[in-house]
Amino acid sequence: MDTSLDSFDRKILALVQHDCHVNAEVIAERVGLSASAVQRRLRRMRSEKIITAEVAIVDNHAVGRPMTFIAGLEIRENYESLPRIRRWAETRPEVQQIYYVTGNVDLMMIITAENVKEYDMITERLMAENPQITRINTNVVLDSIKIGLYVPVE
């Protein structure tokens, strides 16, 4: 897989990260390529998994899931536990992100919920189905200062 990116690719990536629905003609005009060249480059970057997804970002409050929790999980037998926890989380849409980290905890999870009671039910199931978890340290998000997945490309 050749994932080398030239300056045109990087400009295209910067544009589609802000709006994945911008059409090839608009991108072409902004980066100085033809629309067909932009389409080829986008197709290549999708096939090479440089662009891994194109999604709509939904406001949690608008859909009745206003609470966000950052859960730090302490686990034993990390290398055996990680695949099991990964499989568990893949079936749980309320688990938005997971990071394997250094420090006082082993995993950090970003979890959205309707309320604290729902979050408690989620973590209760998580611990019941993954007995290698020894502790969950929870932070409740009071205000979202910045949310994004934009990756600087230039």
Image (cartoon, rainbow, N blue to C red):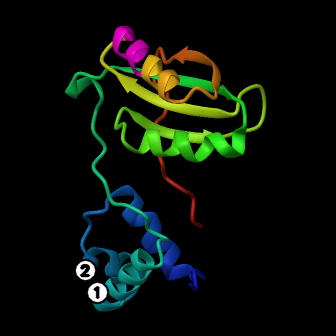
Dominant secondary-structure state across the stretch colored magenta: helix
Q: In the displayed image of the protein, which residue is found farthest to the left?
A: 63
Residue 39 vertical placement versus 144 (above, below): below
Question: In the shown orientation, is residue 26 left or right of residue 81?
Answer: left
> Does the magenta portion include 121?
yes
Residue designated by label 2 = 25
Q: Position of residue 29 (x, y in %)?
A: 32, 80
User: Is 14 in front, or is 128?
Assistant: 128
Crowd around label 1: few <14 · some 14–19 · many ≥20 (10 Å): some
User: Is 3 in front, or is 148?
Assistant: 3
Question: In the shown orientation, is residue 95 left or right of residue 151?
Answer: left
Q: Under tag 2, what secondary structure?
A: helix
Residue 131 vertical placement versus 55 (above, below): above
Residue 89 vertical placement versus 17 (above, below): above
Can you say which quadrant of the picture contains the C terminus? bottom right
Amino acid, disc 1: Ala
- Residue visible at 36% across and 32% down in the picture: 94
Can you say which quadrant of the picture contains the N terminus? bottom right
Give the residues drawn in magenta, as a range. Answer: 116-122
Tell me, yes or no, if residue 150 can be seen here. Answer: yes
Amino acid, disc 2: Glu
Residue 35's label in the rendered image is 1
Crowd around label 2: few <14 · some 14–19 · many ≥20 (10 Å): some
Q: Position of residue 30 (x, y in %)?
A: 37, 75
Tell me, yes or no, if residue 148 can be seen here. Answer: no
